[in-house]
Amino acid sequence: MKIGTVAVLSPGDMGHAVGRALARNGLNIVTSLEGRSERTKGLAESAGFSNLGSLPAVMAEADLVLSVMPPSAAVGMAQSVASAMREANRTPLFADCNAISPSTTSRIGAVISECGASFVDAGIIGPPPGKGKQSTRFYVSGPQAEALAAIDCDGISVRQMGPEIGRASAIKMCYAAITKGSWTLYAAALTTAEIMGLTDLYLKELESSRPHVGDEMRRMVPRLPVDARRWIGEMEEIAATLGGAGLPRGFHEGAAELFRLLDKTPIAAETRETIDPARTLEQALAIYAETVGRSKSLGVDAGATLVAQPLTADAFAPFGDVIAIGQGEPGTRDAFAAAMDNKRSDAQLNVSVSRAKETPVPLQVKWMERHPYSGQTFVPLDISRYLMLVAPSTPNGAPNLGKLQAFIAGPDQGINYRAGVWHHPFTALDRPSECLVLRFDDGSEADTEWFEVADGPTVGIEAGF
């Protein structure tokens, strides 16, 4: 199989460097930048990518598609690519290069195979091409894996692992279990020492008895928040891999929790280009300890109970609007454009149908979310009742859980959340439900912010309501 044009989806930190290396070695590199952030667009331009616009246009030109995404986006990207292949009536070779478990790899392989395309399992080990002393290693497996010899070049070493799907993903998981898993353990131990006032003594002991560990701590721990959000999913995939082998999952489930904590720090807003290179380990640990303290202070006692109230327009007004359904006079119209604000010129309206399972109550609050740049509208399609939890923001931007409010809406009530309102993920009561959801997205991580609630309250419903 001759490979001349390679599509890289998407040209982020790793993807754009892979594309640059392949372009320098004579391959034509293309992508689709629909819905991508300005940063990703800039990386693609700097690496010389050709933006073909839509995914079907990419499928029409590419001989090989490399999926290089955060783990949480891997399945969705495969589904989008399969749909684009059908629309383009063309099936280039597809290689999933994401940090995912063998079971997730098999799921993606089935999605790609169903549309008639060949699938390669790939695992990337090492920093992006040009960033490390060694070439970036692409471990590949599957019946068509030998075709990826075409991308073996200066900066990229392709290593064949045979025809069995899952082997390449497994070696990536085992490798990252040690590297990123160790870094999170370092960060957890160091932050504990910082909270207990032991940092200086602890570091001196490590630098005396285990200097190689102390050196790696200083090099890696201050940088972890920059990648924390996308590494949460990777730790969960590693946990699934270990669990599938009959080993404890808890090591890396804990690492995922640590990354969620680091993602709440101010450092997480930086990028690999803008991170402060002068920040010391000690300075980073002070920030981590402060974040732990802030999270604890925002927590509500696990024994606390909040009783949900019926949804009314007046009570919900600080957070958005209530949409009355089936109650207006014929020939009239209610407009809610003010709540559906869009604070980014490059964001597009995302219209989706959300299908939620029934959630039993009482419910303990574990997560809150918000959409900083867009309002969000929910319109019931097939629903009984649903529960909403909303909270204002504290001065530092976190949800003020001390002022958490709970409402119950019926099938004749839709809602608009205003941009930036902290709310609980959609929660259907009584039975599975379906609703129409509208939001302005640009496809970046900035579309949604998440906040993990420590020891959150329990929300109940009064009997007979």
Image (tube, rainbow, N blue to C red):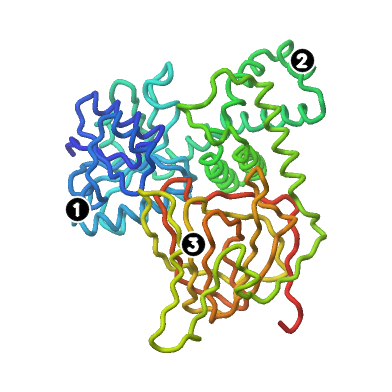
Q: Quadrant of residue 285?
A: top right
Say the numbered circle drawn on residue 90. Answer: 1
Type of amino acid under label 1: Arg
Residue tagged by mark 3? 376
Q: Residue at x 69, y 21 (%)?
A: 282
Q: Quadrant of the N terminus?
A: top left
Q: Give how far apart the Cα atoms at labels 1 and 3 are.
A: 36 Å
Badge 2: residue crowd in 10 Å (few <14, some 14–19, many ≥20)? few
Outermost residue toward the top? 208
Which type of secondary structure does the marked residue at label 3 adopt?
strand
Specify which label sits upstream in the sequence, 2 or 1: 1
Say the numbered circle drawn on residue 41. Answer: none
Q: Looking at the picture, tell me which residue is in the foreground, 385 or 82.
A: 385
Outermost residue toward the bottom? 330
Say the numbered circle drawn on residue 205. Answer: 2
| Res. 248 visible in picture | no
Q: Does the CB distance between marks 1 and 3 fall below 8 Å?
A: no
